[in-house]
Amino acid sequence: MRPRSLTTTLALAFAITTLAVFGLVGSVVYLALERQVKVQDDMDIVLAARHTRRLTDELQSYGEVERFRERLESQVLGNVALSMKIADASGHILVQHNAEDTLTHLPTPSHSVPYDAQITQAAIESVRGREHYPFRMLSVDVRLQDGSLARIIIVRNMRDRWILLDHYRDRLQYAGGIGVLLSFAMGFCLVRRALRPLREVARSASTVTSDKLHTRIAMDRVPKDLEALVRSLNGMLAGLETSFQRLSQSTADLAHDMRTPLANMRGATEVALARTRSVEEYQALLASNLEECHRLSRMIENVIFLARAEHPQFARHMREFDAIEELRRIAEYFEGLAEDAGVHISTNGAGRVTADLELFRRAVSNLIANAVRYTPRQGIIKLSARPTPAWLCVCVENDGAPIAPEMLERVFDRFYRGDPSRGGVESASGSAGLGLAIVRTIMELHGGKAHAESDAHGTRFVLSFPIAADSGA
């Protein structure tokens, strides 16, 4: 089942809110009106009972009650809903008005106000007559001048009030229903109009395809409430465009670099197969092909490492260690390669760092291998560690031709080939231009940074590790 649209959901929310408000207000108004009507009718009953008892108190006997019946009945005249009955102590009716069809079918009062007690609204009873119509009844005792007792019963037929309140309640319900429908219709239209900019954003976003990643969502007609969303979407598109361009460039560079060793192997093999060769020549061919296979293998391993390192769940094993001690170990490992190249490696400095030891070694080793290739004979490669308040800076410095300033930031890009004078990068390293890219990725995994400096005195690659690096970083 498809979920409702946001427009319909908000319109329904408005309608339900309106229904709740109408229901609450209508109930309060209805109950207030009902209570006001009840209080007013009860007051009429109490006043009629008080006046009737006061007049009856002045009469001498039951005979006088019957003789002044018109005077007594006048207390309820003018209100057809009021009924009155006066009976003697034995229950004989002395006076009654509008009571033949009313009081006959009503139950006997459960209590009566004593003749010497004050008449209040609390003494009024609610009873039901025929067809369950409501009545309000008040029974009052009265003492005549000769000492005999009589009972006055005043009854208010609430049928007209009941019908009035029923009609009022029906009108409230009808008005509430109409109000809910209007609220839903108006809410639907207003929400649909209010969400028009969001639909425009969706329409603009739908025009972005793989070949139009440069497209951005226009900000000129976007409401302030959606500016943050649109900026986030444009930022996401910019990131996607950059990543897609890098992926396309990396794929093209990888295909180009893989084509070179494959072409070498194919060409050498075709030449060897052109005529019969000696065993030594075939062995040389196999050795050459094996070297190209190693080169391809290293290239693929580096690409796989970079792909894994970009995954959020890439495993890192952080620990604290002495940086200069690790630099000495790495220098010892490169001693043989350095001697063959005619260069010397020195270490100095101090400091401790929290990092993944294997990744630390790999980053520094890539820099040393790069320095060995480009340092002239009799040159020096200097490894140093220098702590600052926020960073531990590991520096690999070597003599040699400087790198052009415009190329310093790009040397960390994948497959970058910038300086022809420092040529032979791919063939010499077998890294296919991925060594420095791996260094930058390792630093990003540690929350650090890598940068290069180059001048007439030499080239320096600096790795900045945060001193307060968290083990879960």
Image (cartoon, grey):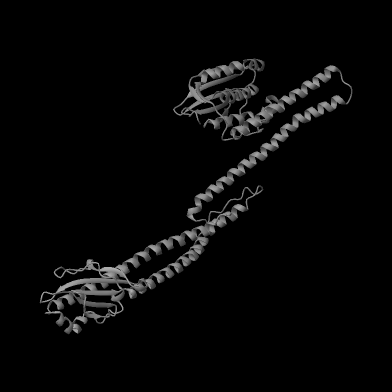
Q: Find the residue positioned furthest to the right.
A: 275
Q: Find the residue positioned furthest to the left.
A: 146
- Residue at image location 69% in from the left, 35% down from the top: 253
Residue 435 in the image: state x and y as whole percent: 63, 28
| Residue 239 showing in the rendered view | yes
Observer-nearest residue: 418 or 428? 428
Residue 100 in the image: state x and y as whole percent: 29, 79
Q: Name the image quarter holding residue 203.
A: bottom right
Observer-nearest residue: 85 or 54? 85
Report the side of 172 relative to 3 (left or right). left
- Residue at image location 62% in from the left, 26% down from the top: 401
Residue 70 in the image: state x and y as whole percent: 20, 84
Q: In this view, does 303 lie above or below 73?
A: above
Q: Is residue 178 above or below residue 469?
A: below
Residue 254 in the image: state x and y as whole percent: 70, 34
Q: Name the image quarter holding residue 330.
A: top right
Observer-nearest residue: 232 or 281? 232
| Residue 423 showing in the rendered view | no
